[in-house]
Amino acid sequence: MTMVRSKLISIGGLVAGTAGLLLFSACGSGTAPVAQNTSASPSSSGPDTSAAPSATSSASTPTPQPAQPPVQASKNDGLCKAGDVKLSIKDSDAAAGTVYRKLVITNASGHSCTIQGFPGISYVTGADGHQVGEAAYRDGAKGDPVQLANGESAIADVGFANVRNYPEEVCKPVETRGLRVYLPQETASNFLAVQGLGCTGKISGNQLTVKTVHKG
C-alpha cells in the first residue's frame, strides 16, 4: 500500500513539472518582441526621391538665349541729303507774268553725292512755317543723275508767277517768308529765305513751277 502511494506521488510530480514547463514556454513566446530590420527597406508610404532631381527647380531655371547681333546702320545710298547742301537763289529772266530764278544747290558735305529729279518746293510763312498754297508744279521730264563733288553745284529752274494777276478774292494773297525745299528722294527739308507773295486760295494756274536739276 505504501509502495503504491509513493509511485502515485512521483507520477503526479512529474506531470505537474511538465505542465509548468509548457506554461512557461507559452508565456515567453507570446511576450517577446519580434525584431524588424528597417535599415534595408524604405517605407512603403511613398517613393524614394532623395536621388531624383527636382522637377520644379529644373523648370524654373531660364534657358540661356543666344546673343542678338547688333543693329546695322543704314548704308549710305550716295544721294545728296538735306544736311549735305547749302541753298541759294539767283535771278534769271521773266516771261508772260512769271519770273524764273535759279535754285542753286551746293554740295557742302565734304564728300561726293548724287542728285536727280525735281526738288519739292513750296511757299511758307508765319512763325510756324506753314505752307501757303500748293507746292511747285513739276515742269518737263526727269533728268539724268548729277554727281556733285564737294563744293560743286546743281541748279533747278523755278518759276514764280505774279499772283497779283489773279483776282484778289480768288488768290487771297499773303506775304511769304521763304521757300521750303525738299531735295529729290529726301524726306527732310531745307529753308531758303525768299520774301514774296503767295496765294492761299485755289487758283487756275500754278504759282510755282520747277524743272529737273542739272549741272550748274
Image: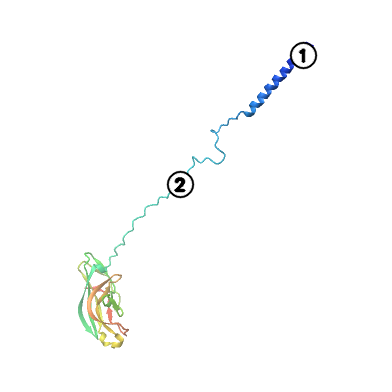
Residue bearing the label numbered 2: 57
Residue bearing the label numbered 1: 5
Q: Residue at x 66, y 26 (%)?
A: 26
Position above or below: 79 against 64: below
Q: Quadrant of residue 98?
A: bottom left
Viewport quadrant of the C terminus: bottom left
Q: Residue at x 66, y 24 (%)?
A: 25
Position above or below: 29 against 9: below
Q: Secondary structure at mark 1?
A: helix
Q: Position of residue 100 (x, y in %)?
A: 23, 81
Q: Residue furthest right?
A: 1
Q: Quadrant of residue 96?
A: bottom left
Viewport quadrant of the N terminus: top right
Q: Position of residue 142 (x, y in %)?
A: 30, 74
What's the residue type where badge 1 is placed? Arg
Observer-nearest residue: 65 or 210? Answer: 65
Q: Nearer the viewer, mark 1 or mark 2?
A: 1
